[in-house]
Image: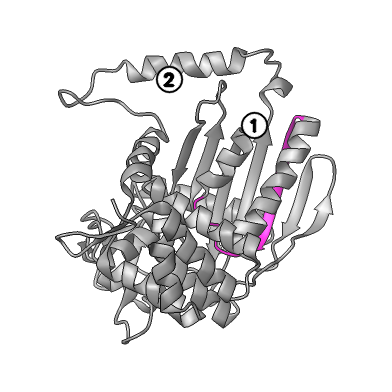
Amino acid sequence: MSSLVENADGSVTVKVTPLKAVISETFFKLGCSELEATRIAERLAGANLRGHDSHGVIRAPRYANYIEEGTQIPNVTVDIKIENETLAVIDGKFGFGQTVGEQAVDIGIKKALNNGLAITALQNAGHLGRIGDWAERAAEKGLVSIHMVNVRGSLIVAPFGGIERRMSTSPFCAGIPLDNGDEPIILDMATSVVAEGKALVALKGGKPLPEDAIVSEDGTITGDPKPLYGETKQGMFPNPNNGSGALRAFGNHKGSGLNFLMEMMAGALTGSGCAGTINEPKRRFCNGMFSIYLSPEAFGHSDDSFVSEVRAYVEFLKSSRPTEPGGVVLIPGEKERQVMADRLKGGVPLAKEAWKDILNAARNAGVMQSKIDDLLA
């Protein structure tokens, strides 16, 4: 297979290495260091590889806009505002989440390895991307971790029983390490029916949304993403803040309650700030992340007793009879690993319009067409 294949339905499939090269070159041209540009490309494409297209390369044009607007700042080093042996309150200073998120997670990992547990409160971070990246990073060091995230300045989700936007997608993530080089168990989910990026994917001609994902201004429940974005002017990238509709919380009151908890922990407690207030409904965009890191050894587990119990329960859970003949019961993260195996081999599928936006962002950043052609050769 060549690096780029145009499919019969108008979509494209791009090999991951040249795809990352185009994204990396784009952000290098926009002022990111070579290391940061590579990091952004790795994490965006990594989300696509795992089937999280909502947090993948489709976000590159929006990130480029963030630099132009000053919403996200290249090449930032975090500041630690408060610190002791097990706690750190960290200011991301609106740097790229792929950079300041990694720095914050490494601070938490170091403290947990030294003290058995740690809590970090990251405030004012740029878009943190796929939160599963951070749980995986902790699991590589043998740590259990929990991550609660909010999005200040992003009012795109309606609370249960409401129509008007009052919440962000507020993801929750947890990671459980295994041993012998096995992939960790990762639970990573938005507290809305879908992440905003999935609505963007659908808007761009990708996978359709569930029929209960959106509530329109008149209270109609729909799977049409257009009410979330409104009209997008020619040459502009869709903005979810411009629509009159809203995403819905998953599971009605349960998802709405979890969403509220993310605001309390990642927004209020970290000091990053909640999605909005009546007096300040339009806040500067950023992510807050409240993270807990736990060493199994600190809980009295010796050798592999923790991992053995985890494996025994996984075996028990997966022994449940599937609802469909030939089906299989999956644990968190298992589907992502299956998708990754397929996409590493066959490439990353992208809607035609999404691919066009990515190439336009590269050109607008100053990447010459000849360079794009070379990267995709």
Q: Residue furthest right?
A: 84
Residue, x 28% and y 72% (percent of image)?
227
- The residue at the point 70 percent across, 67 percent down is 93
Task: Give the x, y percent position of residue 67.
Answer: 57, 76
Relative depth, front residue between 212 and 14: 14
Q: Along the horizontal axis of the image, is 23 left or right of 230? A: right
Which kind of residue does numbered mark 2 sit on? Val
What kind of residue is marked 1? Leu
Q: Which residue is mark 2?
A: 314
Q: Is residue 126 magenta?
A: yes
Label 2 vs 1, first from the N-terminus: 1
Q: Residue at x 31, y 62 (%)?
A: 201
Q: Quadrant of residue 40?
A: bottom right
Residue 46: image location, x then y, percent: 46, 50
Image coordinates of residue 344 in percent, x first then y, are 38, 44
Depth check: 151 or 136 in front? Answer: 136
Residue range in magenta is 116-130
What secondary structure is found at the residue carrying circle 2? helix
Task: Name the residue carrying label 1.
Answer: 143
| Vertical comparison of 36 with 236: above or below | above
